[in-house]
C-alpha cells in the first residue's frame, strides 16, 4: 500500500464521499479558495464548485447553524471550524439543536452532519488555540465524537462519520497532519469500537489522537521488560468499552493517557468505567495521565512540558507495574 499523510487521508475521504454522494457539501472559513486552514480541502472548490464547497463568513455560530439547517432538509454537510477552542461559540447550536433534534422530533428529523475541527498542542498557538475540549462533546447526549490517531483511521473514521444519521464532531490533531502511514482497505475496527494497536500482558494503556503515537513509542521502549497492550479508543461516543475491559481483566493494570487535563475528562470517565467493571481483576487502581491543569503556554519549551510525552508515559508505566522510581526523580 502507498504511504500518505494524515492530511491527505482526510482529503481523500472527503473526495470519495463527495464523488459517491451529491448531498455531501463542505462549508466553513477558507475551505474553498484557500483550501482549508491546514490544507485538508485543497482543490475541492475547483473539483466540485461553489455550490458544494462554500466559503463562509467568520462566524462559527452561523457556520454550524447553517449546517444544521442543511442537514435537516436533506443534505449531508461537513462543516469546519478552525479550532476546537471556538466550540464554546457553537455549543447552543451543537448541544441544544443538533444533538437534541432526533429525540425531540420522535426520530422524524435527524441532523446527519459532521463538524470537522482540530485541537491540541504542537504549534505554539498558545492558550486560546491549543486546547483539548473533547470532554465537552462526550458529555452531550446525542453528539457522536471521533478523534483519529492514525492515517488509516483519519480516512475510515471520516468516511464512517459522513454516513451517520446523527451529528458527529470529528476532532483532528494539528500535530498529526504531516504524519505518514498507509490507509487500510477496511477500517481497523467497526464504528464505535476501540482498536488494539499492540498486544501485551502486563499493562493496558488506553489513549487516542496524538497521545496514541506517544504511547506506542513508550510501549516499544518498555518491551520486552514490560509488555504493554495499547488500546486506541478512536471513537469516544459511541464507545463500546468491551475490548478495553477485556484487556484490563487480562493485564490487571490500566493507564489512561490523554493530552487534555484530567479533571472531569475522558480519562476520568474511562477510569471510572474500569473501576466499576474490572474491580475484581485489578492489581492497582486505574491511573490517569494528562496535561497540566493550566492554560497552554505559548513558549515551545513550556508547551512541551505541559503535556505527556513518551518518556513520561514510560516512567509512569514502570512505576505502575514495578513501582520503579521515575527517571526524573533520581
Image (spheres, rainbow, N blue to C red):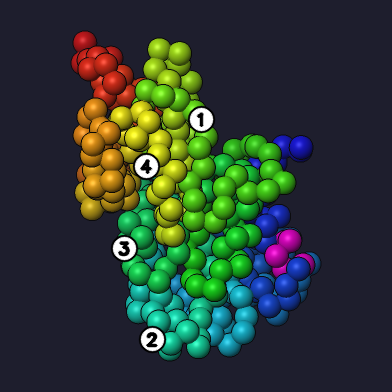
Which type of secondary structure does the marked residue at label 3 adopt? loop
Neighbourhood count class around disc 1 (C-alpha, 10 Å): few under 14, some 14–19, many 20 upward: some
Nearer the viewer's eye, disc 3 or disc 1? 1
Q: Please say if the residues under marks 3 and 4 sit with CB atoms less than 8 Å apart.
A: no
Residue 245, label in figure: 4
Along the viewing direction, whichever of 30 and 207 lies nearer the viewer:
207
User: For mark 3, does the 10 Å Cα neighbourhood hold few (<14), some (14 to 19), or many (20 or more) residues?
Assistant: some
Q: Which residue is mark 2?
A: 104
Disc with the residue nearer the chain's start (2 vs 1): 2
Q: Earlier in the sequence, mark 2 or mark 4?
A: 2
Residue at image position (48%, 20%) is 220
Q: Residue 84: where, in percent of width, then height?
A: 41, 59
Report how far apart the C-alphas of labels 2 and 4 lie in the structure. Answer: 33 Å
Query: Mark 3 or 2 closer to N-term?
Result: 2
- Give the residue pinned by disc 3: 139
Which region shows up in magenta? 15-19
The residues bearing labels 3 and 4 have C-alpha atoms spaced at a distance of 21 Å
Disc number placed over residue 198 in the picture, else none: 1
Q: Seen in the image, is 27 located left or right of residue 136? A: right
Please rate how many residues cluster around mark 2, counting C-alpha atoms within 10 Å: few if below 14, some from 14 to 19, many from 20: few
Judged by depth in the image, the label closer to the viewer, 3 or 4, is 4
Amino acid at each position: 500500500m502507498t504511504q500518505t499523510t494524515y492530511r491527505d487521508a482526510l482529503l481523500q475521504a472527503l473526495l470519495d464521499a463527495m464523488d459517491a454522494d451529491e448531498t455531501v457539501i463542505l462549508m466553513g472559513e477558507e475551505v474553498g479558495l484557500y483550501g482549508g486552514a491546514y490544507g485538508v480541502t485543497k482543490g475541492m472548490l475547483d473539483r466540485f464548485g461553489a455550490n458544494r464547497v462554500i466559503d463562509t463568513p467568520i462566524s462559527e455560530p452561523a457556520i454550524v447553524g447553517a449546517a444544521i439547517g442543511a442537514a435537516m432538509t436533506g443534505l449531508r454537510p461537513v462543516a469546519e471550524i478552525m479550532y476546537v477552542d471556538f466550540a464554546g461559540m457553537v455549543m447552543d447550536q451543537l448541544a441544544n439543536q443538533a444533538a437534541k433534534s432526533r429525540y425531540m422530533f420522535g426520530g422524524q428529523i435527524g441532523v446527519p452532519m459532521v463538524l470537522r475541527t482540530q485541537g491540541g498542542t504542537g504549534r505554539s498557538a498558545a492558550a486560546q488555540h491549543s486546547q483539548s475540549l473533547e470532554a465537552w462533546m462526550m458529555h452531550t447526549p446525542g453528539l457522536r465524537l471521533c478523534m483519529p490517531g492514525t492515517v488509516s483511521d483519519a480516512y475510515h473514521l471520516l468516511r464512517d462519520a459522513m454516513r451517520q444519521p446523527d451529528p458527529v464532531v470529528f476532532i483532528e490533531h494539528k500535530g498529526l497532519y504531516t504524519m505518514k502511514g498507509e490507509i487500510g482497505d477496511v477500517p481497523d475496527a467497526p464504528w464505535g469500537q476501540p482498536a488494539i494497536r499492540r498486544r501485551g500482558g502486563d499493562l493496558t494503556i488506553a489513549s487516542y489522537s496524538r497521545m496514541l503515537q506517544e504511547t506506542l513509542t513508550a510501549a516499544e521502549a518498555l518491551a520486552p521488560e514490560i509488555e504493554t497492550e495499547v488500546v486506541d479508543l478512536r471513537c469516544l461516543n459511541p464507545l463500546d468499552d468491551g475490548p478495553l475491559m477485556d484487556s484490563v481483566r487480562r493485564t490487571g493494570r490500566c493507564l489512561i493517557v490523554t493530552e487534555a487535563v484530567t479533571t472531569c475528562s475522558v480519562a476520568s470517565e474511562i477510569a471510572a468505567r474500569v473501576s466499576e467493571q474490572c474491580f475484581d481483576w485489578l492489581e492497582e487502581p486505574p491511573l490517569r495521565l494528562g496535561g497540566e491543569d493550566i492554560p497552554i503556554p505559548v513558549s515551545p519549551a513550556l508547551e512541551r512540558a505541559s503535556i505527556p510525552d513518551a518518556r513520561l508515559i514510560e516512567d509512569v508505566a514502570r512505576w505502575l507495574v514495578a513501582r520503579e522510581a521515575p527517571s526524573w526523580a533520581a
